[in-house]
Amino acid sequence: MSNDGGAPTPGPDGGQQGIGGGPAGGFRRGAFGVSGSGDTSGFGGLVRVEPGGAVALHSTERPYGGWFDEVTDALVEAVGQATYAAAVQRVLVDRGEITYFVHREHLLTLAQALRDDEALRFELLSSLSGVDYLDSGGPEVTPGRPRLHVVYHLTSMTYRRRIRLEVAVTAEDPHVPSLTGIYPTADWQERETYDMFGVVFDGHPSLTRILMPDDWDGFPQRKDYPLGGVPVEYHDATIPPPDTRRAYR
Amino acid sequence: MTTTQDPYAAGSRETTEGRVYTVTGGDWDQTFGSDLTGEERLVVNMGPQHPSTHGVLRLILDLEGETVTKARVTIGYLHTGIEKNTEYRNWTQGTTFVTRMDYLAPLYNEAGYCMAVEKLLGIEIPQRAATIRLLVMEINRIASHLVGLATGGMELGALTAMTNGFRERELCLDLLEEITGLRMNHAYIRPGGLAQDLPPGAVESIREWLTVMPKRLAEYHKLLTGQPIWQRRLKDVGYLDVTGCVALGITGPVLRAAGLPWDLRKVEPYLGYETYDFEVPTADTSDAWGRYLVRMAEMQESLKLVAQALDRLEPGPVMVDDRKIAWPAQLSLGADGMGNSLDHVQHIMAGSMESLIHHFKLVTEGFRVPAGQVYVPVESPRGELGYHVVSDGSTRPWRVHVRDPSFVNLQATAAMSEGGMIADVIAAIASIDPVMGGVDR
């Protein structure tokens, strides 16, 4: 078994240092252990210009344009100026879509108003998903940074409008109130977000894994969870992950 | 005969053939008391390997007699991690992954994904590409509805519906194979346009198909619509009204069968749907029967759309001009599917070094997409198929989340089947028409 180029030296068992022996610092770089090159075959973290970029940093000042102002005014009126100011961190209008970045304490208040107010009428929770923005500084997990975002796409069937709410929490305190009481459709979508990102939705009737097996360890769609790298277990046999089966470099 | 004598006890009489016993039912009232429900609770596991659960779907049903008191749904048996995989591939490669999610509506996945990428890039695709996208998507809608009808019919015991449905679907797939090179999982729609133009002869094939299909669809009405068994299996089964649908996030034919004409092609038009002449079929029954009628009518509307799209085809490019985005290779249809054209390989390998470098950079590394996030919904055969795509400015998606209509719609299983008979659970799930590849992703 030979390695091409400047790959790390093989370990005593013939495996790859830092790959077969577990990820260094809890973070695995590259899909198949690719490092130190302009990786063209897998995830190499080629560019990390502020993950989330415009999404994570910028905000838009009023007027937002179009019906965005109408919705925002109606929302302010429905929940009150004080609550709105406390609930909404900032607003971003980008590519014709409006995003409200919301503090989790006020999520339920906002969602209830968005659904019930006559001028808002966002009856349908189209989509609920998670995004792990990790950190802007590189592939190291920084505690205390609200890296896990829960993104809600609401649709008003009455006015034919769509808005986006976004709640950010840290990986150490990943609690977000559940929307199942307001939008029952959130049930499975919150379970999926819990399953994949480990976001805990407080108040969910049965927050269990939905796609992964019940006893699965870890949250697969977090950015510090590797693609592959997990042995597949069969009856009486274990197939090692692809990156440790043989030298791919 | 006295009143204490058991009227159901086996009687006997002598015949020339010997003694003949007449056995009738046991006296259940005396044995178990008058309340036969309420005491007995039977938990039945159905699936995940079961011919009637519409895929690898597991149902856990609480039964009292034949009445379902509780229906719990377990999914995840087809989880493939496609969303995670797309984060490790460049933007163009994402097409080949998402097309495998809802494998009965692959072109919708490709279109939704590509429209999201194009929205992030801020580019407009050429008119011809938009028209062809609409064309192949509507062919795909018919194919998908036919499978829904076929498998739904099979699950209810209507095997002719199954054989006929797959027969007609094969006509659709033959067309798609001629156009894209593959029957399913086409990877035909790419960010910026299409993998290639319609091949010679495709328009004629579609026109011929347009003359055949109306007759074939009419046969379904003869076979199923007027048939009393089919009606009784579907009518008043799997009831879910508009309020229930919206609360549970149900879209597509299920919502339209409840009476709400909510079709994204009409309410939030894309690809120029607003300029086409078509109706949004609805029903007011809120049951499996209404969903069947809506799907039948939608296939007719799709035929109208395909015919209109054919008439509008103008010559022109099917990929954006921008050389930094457009796939550099010229693809051609081979006997074994789609591949690079020999002319292109000759050009880059022997003719132009700059083209080779350009090809190499774009194919291996891919293009960059400005940072940001978008949500793009399209009306797939099963409802709102939404793509939430996040870019961090690199050559690979930061996150691709798919709001798959099958996943969300399957939540209605309990609401549709609790309180009904166990046989109606099958009809209810078939009327949702979930595709497990999309549910589990």
Image (tube, rainbow, N blue to C red):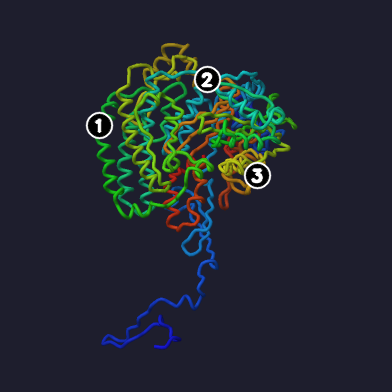
Give the CA separation, mark 2 to mark 3: 37 Å
Left or right: residue A46 compared with residue B64: right
| Residue B41 x/y as whole percent | 54, 64
N-term-proximal mark, 1 vs 2:
2
**In the image, residue B33 above or below residue A206:** below
Q: Is residue A249 among the parts visible in the rendering?
A: no
**Position in image of residue A163 (x %, y %):** 57, 29
Distance in Å between CA atoms under marks 1 and 3: 55 Å
Q: Which quarter of the rendering shows the N terminus of chain B?
A: bottom left
Q: What separation in Å lies between label 1 and label 2 (alpha carbons)?
A: 38 Å
Residue furthest out toward the right: A144
In-image side of B164 versus A14 (left or right):
left
Q: Badge 1 is on which residue?
A: B208
Q: Nearer the viewer, mark 1 or mark 3?
A: 1
Q: Secondary structure at mark 1?
A: helix
Under tag 2, what secondary structure? helix
- The picture places residue B166, in percent across and down from the top left corner, at 33, 43
